[in-house]
Image (cartoon, helix red, strand yellow):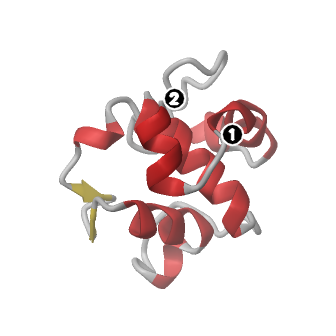
Amino acid sequence: MAAAVALTGGDPARAPALFRRYGCSGCHTIPGVPGADGQTGAPLTGLSKHVYIAGVLENRSDNLIAWIVSPQSFSPQTAMPTTGISEQEAKDLAAYLYAH
């Protein structure tokens, strides 16, 4: 967990509430988040082991944060919407995902 925090600058403890607030849990299966069993988007289990984010970006913390904030700027045809999430909130989500 400490490595994920250092890598992202985020607080993973804030992530579960953010996943629910922004609707992430409706589309994605997210480990450790009750009710996050969506099947529309890719499961986010083991994200730290993936080579690419959404098949388009090298899996690095800066790319993950940028993807969460503005996915359509990297992949205009993606089904993932731009949600209005802040960069700090994206860091919190990234820290959680890299820790799980």
Q: Which residue is mark 1?
A: 19
Q: Quadrant of residue 74?
A: bottom left
Residue positioned 63% across, 43% down in the render: 24
In the rendered structure, find residue 31 and report the number of the disc placed on it: none
Cα gap from disc 1 to disc 2, whole angstroms: 9 Å
Q: Quadrant of residue 47?
A: top left
Q: Residues within 10 Å of mark 1 (few under 14, many from 20)?
A: some
Residue nearer the viewer, 91 or 54: 91
Q: Which residue is mark 2?
A: 30
Q: Is disc 2 placed on a helix, strand or loop? A: loop
Asked whether the viewer can see residue 49, the reply is yes
Measured from the top left, where is residue 99 in percent x and y? 44, 32
Disc nearer the start of the sequence (1/2):
1
In-image side of 88 versus 98 (left or right): right
Amino acid under label 2?
Answer: Ile
Q: Is disc 1 placed on a helix, strand or loop? A: helix
The residue furthest left is: 51
Amino acid under label 1?
Answer: Phe
In-image side of 45 versus 13 (left or right): left
In-image side of 50 versus 9 (left or right): left
Residue positioned 66% across, 18% down in the render: 35
Residue nearer the viewer, 55 or 51: 51
Measured from the top left, where is residue 75 in percent x and y? 40, 77
State the quadrant of the C terminus.
top left
Image: 71 above or below 28: below
Q: Residues within 10 Å of mark 2 (few under 14, many from 20)?
A: many
Residues at badges 1 and 2 in contact (C-beta under 8 Å)? yes
Measured from the top left, where is residue 8 in percent x and y? 51, 55
Measured from the top left, where is residue 17 in percent x and y? 78, 34
Residue nearer the viewer, 2 or 39: 2
